[in-house]
C-alpha cells in the first residue's frame, strides 16, 4: 500500500514540475514570422514548423525576458517520414539564448523545417522567436547566355591578337 502512495505522490510531483509544450505551424514561411512563448516556470519545449517553397536564406533569433536558464533553440529539417522530432530529422544549427538576441543565418533548400525551443524557467518568463526568410536569387538562363557570349568574344579577341603578331 505504501508503494502506491509513493507512486501517486511521484506522479503529482512530476505533473507539478512538468514541462509545457506548444506546437505551432507557421505554414508557408512568410517574409517574417514571429511567436511569443510564456511560462509560469519549469521546463518548456516548443516547436515552430514551417515550409519553404524555394531555396532561401533564413535568419533567426530568440529573445528572452525573465529567468530562463539553459535556453537553447535549434533548426531541423523534417525527415522523410514527414513527422517533427523523429530520428530522421537533420539539424542545421543549435544556439543558446539569454536576454538580448543574437541573429543566426543559414541557407535552406525548399522543404519542411522546424525550430525547437527549450529552456528552464525558475519563475514567470517569456521568450520571442523571430525568423526571416528571403528567397535566394537563382540566375536566369539569359544570364548564362550572356556569360557564354562574353567569354566567346574574349576568346575571339585573344585569338585575333595572336594571329596579328
Image (cartoon, rainbow, N blue to C red):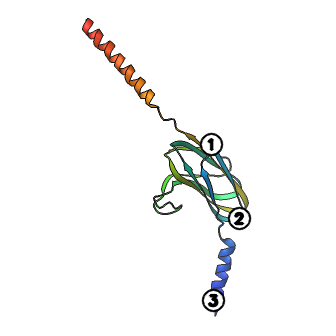
User: Which residue lies under the disc numbered 1?
Assistant: 31
Distance of label 1 from label 3 (alpha carbons) = 54 Å
**Image quarter of the N terminus:** bottom right
| Secondary structure category for the residue under label 3 | helix
| Residue positioned 67% across, 75% down in the render | 15
| Residue positioned 68% across, 79% down in the render | 12
Question: Residue 4's mark?
Answer: 3
| Secondary structure category for the residue under label 1 | loop
Q: Earlier in the sequence, mark 1 or mark 2?
A: 1
| Residue positioned 51% across, 35% down in the render | 137
Distance of label 3 from label 2 (alpha carbons) = 28 Å
Label 2 Cα crowd, 10 Å radius (few <14 / some 14-19 / many 20+): many
Q: Earlier in the sequence, mark 1 or mark 3?
A: 3
Q: Nearer the viewer, residue 154 or 66?
A: 154
Report if the CB atoms under discs 3 and 2 are less than 8 Å apart.
Answer: no
Q: Measured from the top left, where is residue 90 in percent x and y?
A: 47, 55
Question: Residue 120's mark?
Answer: none
Q: Earlier in the sequence, mark 3 or mark 2?
A: 3
Distance of label 1 from label 2 (alpha carbons) = 32 Å
Q: Where, by quadrant of the figure, is residue 22 drawn?
A: bottom right
Q: Measured from the top left, where is residue 107 in percent x and y?
A: 51, 43
Q: Nearer the viewer, residue 37 or 81?
A: 81
Q: Where, by quadrant of the figure, is residue 159 drawn?
A: top left
Label 1 Cα crowd, 10 Å radius (few <14 / some 14-19 / many 20+): few
User: Which residue lies under the disc numbered 2?
Assistant: 41
Vertically, is 162 above or below 25? above
Q: Nearer the viewer, mark 1 or mark 2?
A: 1
Amino acid at each position: 500500500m505504501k508503494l502506491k502512495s509513493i507512486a501517486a505522490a511521484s506522479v503529482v510531483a512530476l505533473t507539478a514540475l512538468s514541462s509545457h509544450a506548444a506546437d505551432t505551424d507557421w505554414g508557408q514561411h512568410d517574409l517574417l514570422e514571429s511567436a511569443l512563448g510564456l511560462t509560469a516556470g519549469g521546463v518548456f519545449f516548443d516547436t515552430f514548423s514551417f515550409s519553404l517553397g524555394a531555396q532561401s536564406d533564413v535568419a533567426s533569433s530568440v529573445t528572452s525576458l525573465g529567468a530562463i536558464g539553459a535556453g537553447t533553440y535549434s533548426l531541423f529539417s523534417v525527415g522523410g517520414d514527414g513527422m517533427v522530432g523523429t530520428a530522421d530529422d537533420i539539424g542545421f544549427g543549435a544556439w543558446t539564448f539569454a536576454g538580448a538576441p543574437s541573429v543566426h543565418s543559414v541557407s535552406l533548400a525548399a522543404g519542411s523545417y522546424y525550430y525547437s525551443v527549450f529552456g528552464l524557467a525558475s519563475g514567470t518568463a517569456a521568450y520571442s522567436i523571430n525568423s526571416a526568410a528571403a528567397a535566394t536569387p537563382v540566375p536566369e538562363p539569359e544570364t548564362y547566355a550572356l556569360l557564354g557570349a562574353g567569354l566567346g568574344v574574349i576568346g575571339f579577341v585573344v585569338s585575333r591578337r595572336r594571329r596579328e603578331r
